[in-house]
Amino acid sequence: MKTQQFSNHVRYYPPHHFIFYPVTGLLLFISIRGVWLDAANRWLWIMIALLAAVTGWLSFMMRQHYALTCQDRLVRLELRLRYYQLTQQRLENIEGRLSFKQLAALRFASDDELVPLMQRTLKEGLSPDAIKQAIKEWLPDTMRV
């Protein structure tokens, strides 16, 4: 497995991204084409197109919502534990001053870099991308959704 870093940390789920969504998109395309080319069954094609569009949209929203809500909670818990192990102080005391996106970016920092980078983020208001780019020793997260 390649070493994870800023340039390669995006992850895809092949059945969802490369099978389900293309098939749904193809169905949507075919049904929209049917609306234009098959005047006798135009309302049927319109209904199929709407069904395909709504199915694709709902599946995306539900998949994202459930997985990301759980993942966000786990990221917070992981950071709270790591921060406590490193500093013997609770992260909750300063957590409210950081956005979730900043916290999520900080999870990639190694133990040696986490606390100084967190203090720098609090002081300078670093963006999530700036945090990721500042990490020298990337701590991979290979189990996220």
Image: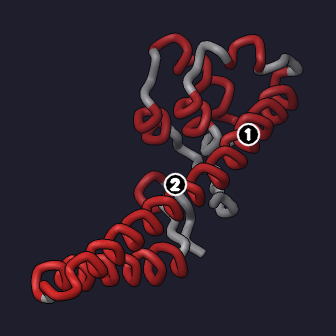
Horizontal and vertical percent position of residue 94: 69, 13
Task: State the quadrant of the C terminus.
Answer: bottom right
Task: State the SS at label 2.
Answer: helix
Which mark, by number, is residue 89? none
Identify which residue, 5 or 96, lies in the foreground.
Answer: 96
Location of residue 50 by image quarter: bottom left
* N-term-proximal mark, 2 vs 1: 2
2 and 1 marks in contact (CB < 8 Å)? no
The image position of residue 45, as x and y in percent, is 27, 80
What's the residue type where badge 1 is placed?
Arg
138 vs 16: above or below: above
The kind of residue on which mark 2 rests is Met
Q: Nearer the viewer, mark 2 or mark 1?
A: 2
Residue 91 falls left or right of residue 108: right
Q: Dot 1, crowdedness within 10 Å: few (<14), some or many (≥20)?
A: few
In the rendered image, which residue does mark 1 sit on?
Answer: 73
Q: Secondary structure at mark 1?
A: helix
**Quadrant position of residue 100:** top right
Residue 130, image quadrant: top left
Left or right: 33 with respect to 74? left
Mark 2 = which residue?
Answer: 61
51 sits left or right of 33 in the view: right
Position of residue 5 measured from the top left corner of the image (x, y, whole percent): 50, 55
| Residue drawn at the location 77% of the way across and 21% of the way down | 91
> Residue 99: x and y, percent?
55, 24
- Along the line of sight, which residue is nearer the eye, 86 or 90? 90
Q: State the residue at coordinates (42%, 75%).
A: 21
